[in-house]
């Protein structure tokens, strides 16, 4: 029982005191947003990342999760992992890294997968916004 409690500590901590909850200014072209849902349960994560365009580094991030405790904890832990990371490194984060850190049981693995999907979607959205902004600039010159 005490071993189990020790393993659950990080999960409960991120669930009870989630880090980086909220949202960023999505009108800003340096902000990318990932909105992903789990078909199995209907839970949803929305993740915003702010990227320093010069260095390609994630300088800020916020999330809102409408879902279970494991999805909230996975999102919270994800934000602590990606803050300060270059986009290419953040894109490599695997749900298994999150599940291992939080000791998620097998039935909760898809909650960490949702977090992996969220960062991938946020990066894709940021990149498409940058392409859009570049095209607008080109059209105006
Ligand atoms: Fe939806 Fe987790 S099944 S809250
Ligand atoms: Fe579905 Fe956790 S139960 S995301």
Image: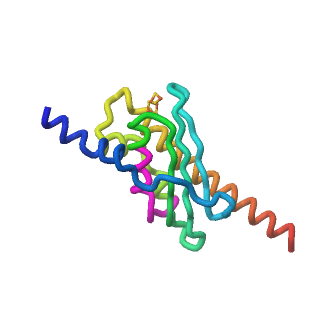
Q: Quadrant of the C terminus?
A: bottom right
Residue 126 lies left or right of residue 19; in this view the side is right
Q: Is residue 85 magenta?
A: yes
- Callout count: 0
View extreme (front): residue: 16
The residue nearer to you, when weighing 30 against 56, is 30
Q: What is the quadrant of residue 4 in the picture?
A: top left
Residue drawn at point x = 30 percent, y = 42 percent: 12
Please give the range of residues in magenta. 74-87
Residue 5, given in percent of the width and then of the height, sits at 19, 37
Residue 88, given in percent of the width and then of the height, sits at 51, 58
Residue 140 lies left or right of residue 7; in this view the side is right
Residue drawn at point x = 50 percent, y = 26 percent: 41
Residue drawn at point x = 44 percent, y = 61 percent: 83
When the figure is inspected, residue 80 is found, relative to residue 3, above or below; the finding is: below
Residue 84, given in percent of the width and then of the height, sits at 44, 65
Looking at the image, in which quadrant does ligand 2 appear? top left
Residue drawn at point x = 52 percent, y = 53 percent: 22
When the figure is inspected, residue 76 is found, relative to residue 130, above or below; the finding is: above
How would you classify the magenta stretch by its main secondary structure?
Answer: helix
View extreme (left): residue: 2
View extreme (right): residue: 140
Q: What is the quadrant of residue 55 in the picture?
A: bottom right
When the figure is inspected, residue 99 is found, relative to residue 48, above or below; the finding is: above
Q: Is residue 38 magenta?
A: no
Residue 61 lies left or right of residue 102; in this view the side is right
The residue nearer to you, when weighing 15 against 8, is 15
Residue 101, given in percent of the width and then of the height, sits at 30, 45
Q: How is the image coloured?
A: rainbow
Q: Quadrant of the N terminus?
A: top left
């Amino acid at each position: 029982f005490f071993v189990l409690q020790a393993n659950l500590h990080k999960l409960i901590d991120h669930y009870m005191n989630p880090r980086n909850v909220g949202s960023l200014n999505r009108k800003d072209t340096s902000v990318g947003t990932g909105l992903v849902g789990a078909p199995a349960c209907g839970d949803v994560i929305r993740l915003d990342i702010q990227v320093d365009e010069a260095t390609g580094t994630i300088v800020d991030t916020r999330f809102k999760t409408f879902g279970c405790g494991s999805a909230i904890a996975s999102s919270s832990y994800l934000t602590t992992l990606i803050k300060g990371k270059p986009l290419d490194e953040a894109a490599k984060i695997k749900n298994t890294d999150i599940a291992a850190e939080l000791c998620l049981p097998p039935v909760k693995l898809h909650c960490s997968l949702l977090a992996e999907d969220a960062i991938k979607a946020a990066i894709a959205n940021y990149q498409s916004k940058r392409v859009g902004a570049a095209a607008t600039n080109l059209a105006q010159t």
